[in-house]
Image (cartoon, rainbow, N blue to C red):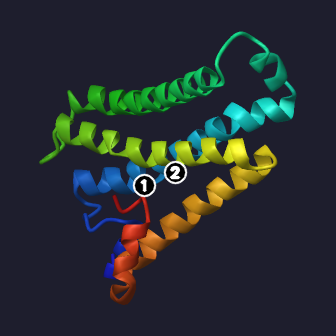
Amino acid sequence: LPPAIEAFLGTDLAIGTPAGFLNAEFFSWVTILLIVYAVTQGTGAIAGEESSGTIDLLLAQPVHRSSVVLAKAAAAITGVALIILIGYGGFLIPMLFVSMAGLSLWDVFVACANMLPVTLFFFALSLWLGAVAPSRAYASGAAIAVATAAYLIDSLAAGVESISGVRYASPFYY
């Protein structure tokens, strides 16, 4: 692929290698799906309860408000981690039978684990937006807009040398 396309796709790995193929066919889009899941869970934790009218019943119980938020956050984080582990399991079993030249199970585990920080960043953002935005729709829209802008900034800055310093502002860079 031309260097500009590789930069936009976020990799300089050749698609003919196992690492390049997995990056192009799995890791490039699964992270986006995890972010959508995290935004859904984050905005649903507070704003979802509020819009469905159940937050009054929940907070009328003898529990601290922080306990409710922490429990919902722990459940969402566990869900994200389980999805990532299931994805890793999907690689684990075939890699026992198929040789992936130059790619170990540890490499795949690290690649899977690297999806967690960016996903949790957008979960935290959407949880906060769900608490301060006037509705779940506004919170979801804002979180997805930030995620989209961050992805485009990182992708464009990877291919355009004059704005490469802007990549540091995107969580996708890290």
Quarter assignment of residue 48: top right
Mark 1 or 2, closer to the camera = 2
Residue displayed at 33% across by 58% down: 174
Relative to residue 156, is residue 52 drawn left or right?
right
Sort mark 2 into few (<14), some (14-19) or many (20+) by Cα contacts within 10 Å: some
The spot of residue 75 in percent (x, y) is 54, 23
State the separation of the CA atoms marked 1 and 2: 8 Å
Is any atom of residue 16 visible in this view?
yes
Q: Which residue is label 2 attached to?
A: 32
Please determine whether, in this image, residue 127 is positioned above or below residue 18: above
Of residues 34 and 2, the one drawn nearer to the viewer in this rendering:
34
Point out the image quarter for the N terminus.
bottom left
Drawn side of residue 83 relative to residue 136, left or right? left
Instruction: Determine whether 110 is above or below 133 in the image.
Output: above
How packed mark 1 is, by other alpha carbons closer than 10 Å (few <14, some 14-19, many 20 or more), is: some
Residue at the farthest left position: 102
For the point 18% across and 36% down, the residue is 106
Q: Which residue is mark 1?
A: 28
Q: Are marks 1 and 2 in contact (CB under 8 Å)?
A: yes
- Along the viewing direction, whichever of 94 and 152 lies nearer the viewer: 152
**For this rendering, which residue is in front, 141 or 23?**
141
The answer, for residue 5, to whether it is visible in the render is no
**Amino acid type, callout 1:** Ser
Write the residue at 52% across / 51% down: 32
Answer with the quarter of the image where residue 62 lies: top right
Q: Position of residue 43 (x, y in %)?
A: 68, 40
Image location of residue 60, percent across then percent down: 79, 15
x, y percent for residue 71: 57, 21
Q: Amino acid at mark 2?
A: Ile
Is 44 rendered above or below residue 145? above
